[in-house]
Image (tube, rainbow, N blue to C red):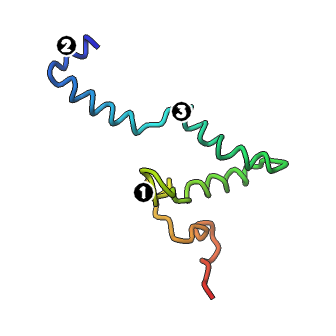
């Protein structure tokens, strides 16, 4: 810290704020793994076997669902990285969109 203060001088706190904002947006690896495990574990416990197709479907559903609240409300993880997700996200898998009768 002393070396940073020596090198940055009066800009130390400005750089500290910028760095804190950047690091605040990054999830630590263990936090991300715990989040995925929390979501995936109940689904795996309900199945006899976990195959790659089931994991791929879980990944698809998670990445296309919209968050109901919080700072990411009304956005899906896919939308947050720039992917356009249609209203009926299952059309991305190939089936025709649902039609209201």
Q: Earlier in the sequence, mark 3 or mark 2?
A: 2
Which residue is disc 3 drawn over?
29
39 sits left or right of 68 in the view: right
Q: Position of residue 35 (x, y in %)?
A: 59, 41
Which residue is disc 2 drawn over?
6
Asked which secondary structure carries label 1, the reply is loop
Which residue is disc 1 drawn over?
82
Asked which secondary structure carries label 2, the reply is helix
13 sits left or right of 25 in the view: left
Using the image, determine if residue 93 lies above or below residue 56. below
Q: Which mark is residue 91?
A: none
- Which quarter shows the C terminus? bottom right
Q: Position of residue 19 (x, y in %)?
A: 31, 31
Residue situated furthest left in the rendering? 10
Q: How far separated are the C-alphas under marks 2 and 1?
A: 40 Å
Using the image, determine if residue 6 lies above or below residue 31. above
Q: Position of residue 11 (x, y in %)?
A: 17, 25
The one of 26 and 72 positioned closer to us in this rendering: 72
The one of 93 and 85 positioned closer to us in this rendering: 85
**Viewer-nearest of labels 1 and 3?**
3
Q: Residue at x 33, y 31 (%)?
A: 20
Q: Earlier in the sequence, mark 1 or mark 3?
A: 3
- Which quarter shows the N terminus? top left
100 sits left or right of 9 in the view: right
* Mark 2 Cα shell of 10 Å, populated few (<14), some (14-19), many (≥20): few
Using the image, determine if residue 90 lies above or below residue 47. below
Q: Residue at x 21, y 29 (%)?
A: 14
Q: Position of residue 4 (x, y in %)?
A: 25, 16
Q: Residue at x 48, y 55 (%)?
A: 69
Q: How far separated are the C-alphas under marks 1 and 3?
A: 22 Å
């Amino acid at each position: 810290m002393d070396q940073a203060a020596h090198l940055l001088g009066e800009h130390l706190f400005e750089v500290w704020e910028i760095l804190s904002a950047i690091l605040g947006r990054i999830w630590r690896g263990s936090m991300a793994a715990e989040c995925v495990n929390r979501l995936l574990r109940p689904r795996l416990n309900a199945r006899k076997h976990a195959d790659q197709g089931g994991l791929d479907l879980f990944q698809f559903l998670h990445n296309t669902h919209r968050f109901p609240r919080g700072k990411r409300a009304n956005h899906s993880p896919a939308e947050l990285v720039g992917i356009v997700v249609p209203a009926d996200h299952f059309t991305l898998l190939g089936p025709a969109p649902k039609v209201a009768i």
